[in-house]
Amino acid sequence: MNDAEPAGPLDGLRVIEVAGEQGQFCGKLMADLGADVIKVEPPGGEDARAIGPFLADEPDPDKSLSFWHYNTSKRGVTLDLECADGAIAFKRLVATADVLLESRAPGHLPSLGLGYEDLRAINDGLVMCSLTPFGQTGPWRDYVSSDLLHLAAGGQMASCGYDEADVPDAPPIAPDGGNAWHTGAHFAYIGIMAALVQRTITGAGQYVDASIHEACALTTESAVASYVFRGDEVTRQTGRHHSPRPTPRTQFRCRDGKYVNAIVWGLTPPMLRRLAEWMDSHGLADDLLDGRYQDTKFIRANTDHIVNDVIANFIANMDSDEIYHGAQDRGFTWSSIRTPDELLDDPHLADREFWVDVPHPELGTRYTYPGSAAIYNGSPWQISRRAPLVGEHNVEVLRDELGLADEEMRQATGVQGNPTSSR
């Protein structure tokens, strides 16, 4: 960020991140909002650097595209926390921080003398958040987990799959892309922000014990509430929300072979009339202009015909963008399903300047990244730098800011030879 650009809403906040795949998204949320996030990695880098795909399909700790995305705007140092020198340097770093985010196994940092009680003694304003699979306590505390496990145990997969009519006896399906890690990281972020607000009142920090499993169990939309309050068990439905009872389909194939999402339940007589008049302009309204469709009960009784006969046929005779924009113009929440490549050219995302080019000076070029889901007009979100190379800021942070001598850096980082080396 240059001096002419306004500061982000978390400008002035220093965050120390000791997190792998489970927690790095939480750090990104704070870094892209202006916090000075210093990612502390073991010698050689986090395991998350081994997650593909890689630039030019060349596996390399500094070329993981996944790591690039989740670690924007952060600075990076390497410290060997298992050795005394590394632990001492880490404490000096934490003494300068507002927040410590960590996702190591429960009890690991305390076993190194780096638990919350140890660190609070040197920084009583510290907000420390531990994001772990099942939290710091309870019978599952030490269980091994995965993204798939959390989506199953948390309840998401009970709601994801296909209609029995589409795929008989279909298994539950887990969405891809680390959804459990995103969910846990989001809840950790919320907890950190709440603790920081409390700190402005009391002046004291606190410990936030965030559980990915609990976060997932709280993120099943209406499934848990339907069961607890009404005794209803929801069932999976193709391409749409779970429900205790079947609801009209929402995915339809267009003339150009692409699909649209068309929400068609809850049609009122005026809405159906508006839709029918649009269909009629293309000669595809069938019987929907009949006066009987001005009666809500009649609409409900004939939903199957309206959706599966008339609307499906109308959409099948139109291109996806015609349906998308035509429906939106008439107040319907219908949309075209884009492929990743098509999203890059989506005019709506272009208008909101969603895609951003991030410089990679070490490669002599820039790459296009996904941007923010929100626009902050007074305290902007922005990617201030690409993800750090392994140990890229060792000298800047450990020597120049903390004052470590070269030999201290050498011992603390586990780097042999030149302590200014990035690896």
Image: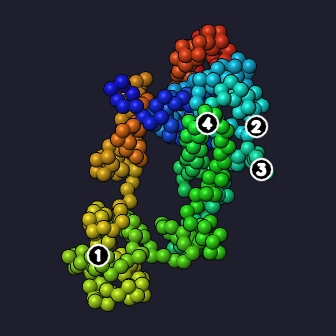
The three-letter amino acid code for the residue at tag 1 is: Leu
Q: Could you tell which of marks 2 and 4 lies nearer the N-terminus?
A: 2
**Which residue in the structure is indicated by mark 2?**
107
The three-letter amino acid code for the residue at tag 3 is: Gly
The three-letter amino acid code for the residue at tag 4 is: Thr
Q: CA distance from mark 2 to mark 3?
A: 13 Å
Q: Nearer the viewer, mark 2 or mark 4?
A: 4
Q: Are marks 1 and 2 in contact (CB under 8 Å)?
A: no
**Which residue in the structure is indicated by mark 1?**
275
Q: CA distance from mark 2 to mark 4?
A: 28 Å
**Which residue in the structure is indicated by mark 4?**
202
Q: Position of residue 290 (x, y in %)?
A: 27, 88
Q: CA distance from mark 3 to mark 4?
A: 30 Å
Label 4, residues with CA under 10 Å away: few <14, some 14-19, many ≥20: few
Position above or below: 172 against 35: below
Colour approach in the figure:
rainbow
- Answer with left or right where residue 374 lies relative to residue 294: right
Residue at 65 percent across and 75 percent down: it is 231
Q: Position of residue 60 (x, y in %)?
A: 54, 30
Q: CA distance from mark 1 to mark 2?
A: 60 Å
Q: Quick one: 230 or 103, which is closer to the camera?
A: 230
Dividing the picture into quadrants, the one containing residue 412 is top right
Dividing the picture into quadrants, the one containing residue 175 is bottom right
Q: Could you tell which of marks 1 and 4 lies nearer the N-terminus?
A: 4
Q: Could you tell which of marks 3 and 4 lies nearer the N-terminus?
A: 3
**Which residue in the structure is indicated by mark 3?**
138
Q: Could you tell which of marks 1 and 3 lies nearer the N-terminus?
A: 3
Q: CA distance from mark 1 to mark 3?
A: 54 Å
